[in-house]
Image (tube, grey):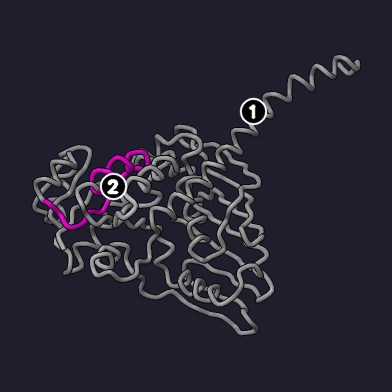
Amino acid sequence: MRVALIGSGVAGRSHLLDLVTNSRFDVRAVVAQHLEQARRTAEEFAIPAAHSDVTEMLSSVNPDAVVVATPPSATPSILRTVIDHGCLVLVDKPAGSRSRELREIVADSPDASVVVSYNRRYQVPVRACRALLSDVDTADVHRIRCTWRGPFAARYNSSATHRHAVRFGDGVLLDTASHVLDTLNYLGVVPTTVVGVRARQGGAAGADIEVDMQLTTHQGARVQISIRNDDAVDGDLWCVEFSGGHGQLDMTRDVLVGTWHGQAVSVGAADVRRPVDDLLALADGTDVCGATLAEAVRVLELLDSARQHVENAHELRRWQRPRAKALGRLNGAC
C-alpha cells in the first residue's frame, strides 16, 4: 500500500515509525507546513519525497492512503482534500476542534473511508472491557468515574508542539477529555448530556489544564470525569471505574481487574494493534478499531456543550456580582 504522511510532529513521527516497520506499507512522501521540516523527516526515515503542499503531493505521489497528523484546527480542510482525492485516511484524534466542521464533512462525504485514531480503542484492557459490557444491559452500569493525570501545565507551556499556542477551551478538554468520551462511546456506555463543568486555566496562551465534568448516559448512568495536572507524572496516567448491578471493573492502560457476574476479572496488557493497521483493514474490508467520523462528531458535540457550560458559568458570575452589590447597598449592609 502506497502511503503518505501529512504532519511531522510528535504524533506524525509515531505513526511514521509504525508505517516504516510494517512491510505492507510503502511510504512515499512526508508533508509538513515547512518544506525543510518535511525534508529532514523524510531523510531521517528514508522516505523518497518531501512536500509542503498537500494538493501537490497528492498529484505527484498519488497515494492509496494517507495518515493525517496535524493540529485539530488545520485537520478538517486537509481531510476534505484527501477525501476528494479518493484516499483511505487515518486521521489523528480528535480530527477537528468543533463539531460543525466534521459534521459538514460527514454530510458531504458520507461514504468516505476515514478512521479516527483514538488510541484507547487499540489497547487490550479497553477491548476486553468492551467485550464484558457487550454481554450485559449497560443500563445496569450506574456509575462511571474517569480519572486522568498528566503534566498538562508543562505540556501547554512547551513550544515543542502546537499546544503552547492553544487557548482556553482547546486544552485538555479537546486533547484529553475527547479520549475519555470516545472510550466510553466505544465501550457502549454513551454519554449524552453534560450536566456541569469546571475548568482551570494555565499554559502559555491560557489553555484549560484541569477539568471536572459531570455527564449522564442515555442509559441513566452518572459519569464523573476528572482531569488533573500532575507535574510529577511522566506521561498520562488514567483509570476508568465502572460500578453497577453486575459488579465492579477498574481499567487502566495496563490492566482490567474487578468482579463481573460474580467472576474475578484480570486482563493484562499485551501487544496492541497499531492505528496504521486500520488502513489495511479498510483496504481488506475488515473491521477497524478506530472511530468513524460520525463517532468523532458526537465527541466534539459533547465538548461544544462543555465549553458552553463554562462560558455560561462565567457570564453568570459577571452578571451576579454587581446585582448582589447593589442589593447590599439597599439593605444597608455596605
- Mark whose residue sits in front, 1 or 2: 1
What is the spatial separation of the Cα atoms under label 1 and label 2, in whole angstroms?
A: 37 Å
Evaluate if marks 1 and 2 touch, with contact meaning CB atoms under 8 Å apart: no
- Name which residue lies at 48% across and 51% down: 298
**Nearer to the camera, 310 or 168:** 310
Let me know if residue 77 is in the magenta part.
Answer: yes
User: What is the quadrant of residue 161 in the picture?
Assistant: top left
Residue at image mark 2: 9
Give how far across and how far down residue 3 sits, in percent: 18, 57
Residue at image mark 1: 315
Give how far across and how far down residue 208 sits, in percent: 52, 40
Give how far across and how far down residue 103 sits, in percent: 41, 45
Residue 126 against residue 261 in the figure, above or below: above
Query: Is residue 202 left or right of 62 when viewed as pictured?
Result: right
- Name which residue lies at 49% across and 37% down: 207
Over which residues does the magenta segment extend?
Answer: 62-83
Q: Secondary structure at mark 1?
A: helix
